[in-house]
Image (cartoon, rainbow, N blue to C red):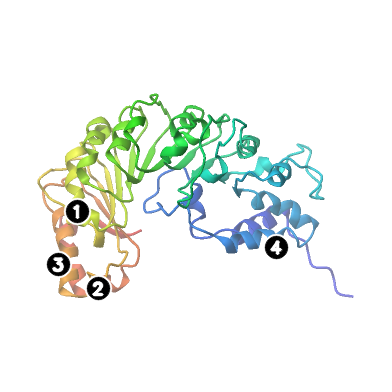
Amino acid sequence: MAAAAPSLPVEVWLQVLRWATLNPWTHALYTSEYSPFEAVDVNVGTPEISHTKRALVLVCKDWRRWALPLLYEDILVSTSQSLHRLLQSRSDLAVDWDATSRCPADFVRRAHLPYSSTTTPTPRTPRSVDTLALCSSLEVLVRAADALTPFAYEFNIECPPLPSLKRIDWWHHNEAARSGGINSLTRVLEVSPNVEYLSVGGELWATYLLTARVHLPHLTTLRFRRVNTFFVLTLCRWTFPSLRHVIFDNILDGDLFWAFWTTFGSQIRTVELGISLKFYIQDFLEYVFAGCTQLEELNYYVHFTHPPSTHWPQNTLNTVGLHAHPNSFFRVGTAEYWEHVGRHLEAFASPAFPALRRVLLYGDWRASMGMDEFHRIVQPLRDKGCMIEVA
């Protein structure tokens, strides 16, 4: 009779199940700490991961118990009564909970709350707010733009305390914001004092310029997805003493950030630019260098950004990250490609960047690095004592 296969320790199974439910965006969607080039679309869909989680809990009793925290870690909050009941249920899932008698709501780490779930056609608080209040370990709150459907925001809405929140991905909705509470970024931040990462988007109406001031003592990373001048001016009335990292996904006009540089420029240590040709057309690096007096790290997509100017010396910049995400205008190996990349590297080799010590290459640089021209254009940086590394 064949011997029974040895069983694995529970810790190993937990790790296996965790790896089975990860995707390339998992860390980027949950993290509250800055890492270069992790500013992914907060609405990125992962249906295959959801299917995997649902399948795992059906395998056996043990897998069900181990995988349930993964199943509930990321939820879409609706006004559904069944969701509300499920999150606070301890018995109808037919599993043996541990001694702490935790319910599914305790496992929720990230919640996507669409504006369609927080309408106020009547004075009654939407069930979605009560559902959100159940999630005592919530770390990430996502408020995304809904489809252009008429919603009713006629009465004030409440907002539960959110002390565990570390990250907020917020898209402003002018009509919804009139109802305050969970529909108002200002109010949500007031009840979320431990937020470390904030991404914002939307076009703010001028009527919201005089909203209450906000103080976020732990905020280290601010991400601009797409904002207008009124949004920038509102942020400049707030205080972020720990702010160090700023990410720009896109810009309407480089000039609208002058107030931001004036208010926060001296405390910014890291700037990252996203995938947008606006950074090339408007030469946005010129604004960055003029506004940041203590910049230490700069990360951008080299094929979507105008070569840096040397008009504004950066005496503290020590690290530059260049991402090779492709652009059809600059095909690898062409004269236009080498001329463009060469201008970037030539600028950083100049005396305008005396403290530069590292250039990190992100993305796929393999084709370029295999050509003699690459070694020729990076040689001035090496002569300067700068290390060229693949990240």
Q: Horizontal and vertical percent for residue 267? A: 28, 33
Count residues near mark 4 (Cα–Cα under 10 Å), then give few for <14, some for 14-19, many for 20+. Answer: some
- The relative height of residue 173 versus residue 25 in the rendered view (above or below) is above
| Sequence-wise first label, 1 or 2 | 2
Mark 2 or 4: in front is: 4
| 88 relative to 38 in the view: left or right | right
Check disc 3 and report the residue beneath it. Answer: 339
Q: Residue at x 62, y 59 (%)?
A: 50
Mark 3 or 1: in front is: 3
Mark 1 or 4: in front is: 4
How far apart are labels 4 and 3 at the CA level? 52 Å
Secondary structure at numbered mark 3 = helix
Q: Any mark on residue 332, and which?
A: 2
For the residues bearing labels 1 and 4, Cβ distance under 8 angstroms: no
Mark 4 or 3: in front is: 4
Check disc 1 and report the residue beneath it. Answer: 385
| Sequence-wise first label, 1 or 4 | 4
